[in-house]
Image (cartoon, rainbow, N blue to C red):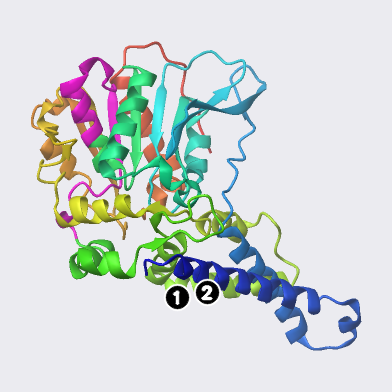
Amino acid sequence: MRYMLTYDFMESLRVTNQWFGSTARAMCSYPQLGLYANPMIKLTAAWGEVTERSFARMVTKPDWGIYSIPADDGRDHSVSVERVVPRPFGDLIRFKVQGRAPTGRKVLLVAPMSGHYATLLRSTVLSLLPDCDVYVTDWHNARDIPVSAGKFDVEDYTLYLVDFLRVMGPDTHVIAVCQPAPLALAATAYLAEEDPAAQPRTLTLIGGPINPDAAATDVTDFGRRVTMGQLEKFVVQRVGFKYAGAGRMVYPGLQQLTSFMAMNAEKHATAFSNQILRVAKGQASDHDKHNKFYDEYLAVMDMTAEFYLSTVERIFKGLEVAQNRFTVNGKKVDIGKITTVAVKTVEGGKDDISAPGQCVAALDLCTGLPDHKKASYLEPNAGHYGIFAGKSWRDKIRPLVLDFIDANCSVPKSPVRVVG
């Protein structure tokens, strides 16, 4: 699998399916075919439309699509995205709300690097913007990063977070979603020893695999079944000739997407079948619920092979964070050194990716932190996506996180707005 032609073959399959879809849509959309009372013509055109859009989205980075937000002064304030710290593998970006005074809540939203772009957190950002000054880790697609930029593994990821926090200052509140939770915890512990003044005020960990062994899921079972040799041989590939990162070893986003889809194959098949019927009946729209979700879900990015492999080996198999044995540049990061940063964990009772028990394990690792600076919350009926972007986030979890931030920060804050 370590050949550039293998990567190009996968891309060729994607392009071919996109072409099949566009061809079916075009051929079955001729006005003359309307004379034939055959429902298969409309169904084929609808299948082509859905297929073309789906395969086209797989290589396109979605736009944030956040242009303005309402404020307490009765006006809509425009929002611009600024690059605060540009780096080869990811930038620290800020959503600057024009004409608004600081809210007193400076939030670093740590986006996962698990196959999707940071825009997966668009609704999370949008829900926080009325009450917070929001910064996000905007990770780059590994296929677009030249080999000359070097490597990027879990230690580099951790050091990126350390650098971002140093730039943002000590009045920062970190919210880490899913995959980066253990590394955000490690970055905080690293700062506790190396640069205590740069530590954040609070650390909220949402649905992250702090201790993958605490509760089994398909993800943890996969990590136990396969060996590192099998992953290196059958999973990682070299970027093909089409992209700037040609020759770089990556875990392809298309391969990760296949795994995502396989976990809930029946659910996805039903969703696409229903969408084809809606398109055929003229009931679908460009921004309907299906397209809004799958335009983001299908947009995938490649991870560097060293990041993917080190995550599996050190976080899932080796349990280095779970057992407080994680090292950065040869130095042990002691999570027990966290003594002033308030830590909160959030879990979903129906989370099939990071099951309840995996994230709350972080609190037991914070042995130097007093109990009044620890908090946890379990939303019984929420799945993985719901705890950071769905109804459960908006109605229950978001208010609790903002209350947690306010309770652990003395900076004057603006009143919290109700988000419906």
Q: In which quarter of the image is residue 367?
A: top left
Crowding near pointer 1: few (<14 within 10 Å), some, many (20+)? few
Residue type beneath disc 2: Thr
Query: For the residues marked 2 and 1, what is the alpha-carbon distance in whole angstroms?
Result: 6 Å
Relative image position of residue 10 (x, y in whole percent): 50, 70
Q: Quadrant of residue 11?
A: bottom right
Left or right: residue 29 compared with residue 277: right
Relative image position of residue 412 (x, y in whole percent): 40, 11
Mark 2: secondary structure: helix
Mark 1: secondary structure: helix
Callouts 2 and 1 close, C-beta under 8 Å = yes
Residue type beneath disc 1: Glu
What residue does disc 2 label? 270
Left or right: residue 366 compared with residue 235: left
- The answer to whether residue 165 of the structure is visible from this angle is yes
Q: In which quarter of the image is residue 69?
A: top right
- The answer to whether residue 280 of the structure is visible from this angle is no
Relative image position of residue 410 (x, y in whole percent): 32, 12
Q: Give the range drawn in magenta.
A: 186-215
Q: Check residue 3 in the rendering and tell me which mark sits there, or answer none.
A: none
Relative image position of residue 377 (x, y in whole percent): 26, 41
Taking depth in this image into account, of 50 and 17 the one nearest to the observer is: 17
What residue does disc 1 label? 266
- In the displayed structure, 54 sits above or below 247; it is below
Taking depth in this image into account, of 334 and 39 the one nearest to the observer is: 334
- In the displayed structure, 29 sits above or below 194; it is below
- Look at the image and say whether residue 192 sits in the magenta stretch: yes
Left or right: residue 126 compared with residue 341: right
Q: In which quarter of the image is the N terminus?
A: bottom left
- Look at the image and say whether residue 26 sits in the magenta stretch: no
Crowding near pointer 2: few (<14 within 10 Å), some, many (20+)? few
Task: Name the residue rendered at 32%, 70% in the picture.
Answer: 234
